[in-house]
Image (cartoon, rainbow, N blue to C red):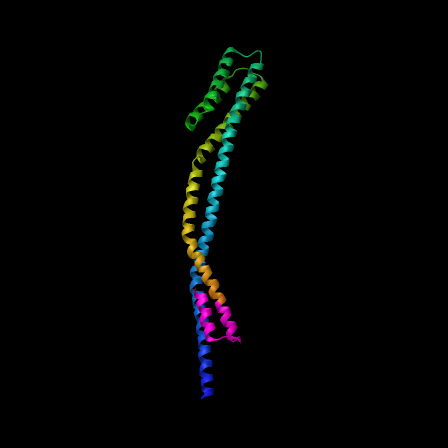
Amino acid sequence: MTGENVKINTLERKDLIDGVIAKHKRFIEEYTGEFKELDEKVTSLNEQADSAIANKESVVERVDVLKEKRQQLYHQAENLLGDFFSFDDIAKDDNKLIHSINDGIIKIKPSTIIANEKQIVDEISSKLLQISLDKEDVKKLILLIKARVDEALASSVELNSITGSDGKFNDSFFKLNSELKDTLPRHGWLKSRIENHTEGLKYWEDTASGKVVTLDEAVEQDKVVEA
């Protein structure tokens, strides 16, 4: 009878350990599938959120650069315009054109409406071509001024195209961040469960391979993993 009891107890202990191992494997497989999906989602959300912030900062920086560049170019055009008065033989009509061009530059500098700015730049370009003083230095001066106002207008066009997009990137970031906050608790819980069940599986596989534990120890270890 004693030998039979030992055999029965041994089988019950082995069955218990096999059952615990199978349980841990089942939970690991179940949780791992969902965790992989959420982990990919978390990675994607983080990358998109980082991209949204980077794009917002890039737009803000570019807006500042374009505003400063625009003002400097119109200021340079205004200064170059003053060089016309270094010529002693400037005609009266040319003098009027130069003053009219200067008025246009003064008017254009604070402008925020791109259509108005384009119109004034076109008028400035037309008036520059009407200057009659036929000297090589004058021709070069006309080209320099035209290049400045054209480049300033190009800055305004680009500025107009990106103004407000920083707000869109900001809204996108908050939306992504909100979705990330909703996802992270489950993601963290699954990660913790997988780690616990992986530790439990290793423990019982080591036990099955030769380590001796009591049934009470088995029950307590299983409770710890499930906690």
Name the quarter where the C terminus is drawn: bottom left
Where residue 223 sits in the image (x, y, percent)?
A: 44, 68
Q: Residue at x 44, y 44 (%)?
A: 173
Q: Residue at x 46, y 47 (%)?
A: 48
Label tally? 0
Where residue 110 sits in the image (x, y, percent)?
A: 46, 24
Q: Residue at x 44, y 75 (%)?
A: 16
Name the quarter where the N terminus is drawn: bottom left
Most extreme residue toward the bottom, as rendered? 1
Specify start and end residues of the magenta stretch as a single range.
200-226
Q: Is residue 134 above or below residue 194?
A: above
Residue 89 is inside the magenta segment: no
Where residue 154 sits in the image (x, y, percent)?
A: 49, 30
- Locate residue 32: give its quadrant: bottom left
Q: Is residue 173 above or below residue 202?
A: above
Residue 216 is inside the magenta segment: yes
Q: Residue at x 45, y 38 (%)?
A: 166
Q: Which sits in the foreground, 186 or 70?
A: 186
Q: Which sits in the foreground, 169 or 144?
A: 169
State whether the magenta stretch is mostly helix, strand or loop: helix
Where residue 184 sits in the image (x, y, percent)?
A: 43, 54
Q: Which sits in the foreground, 190 or 81?
A: 190
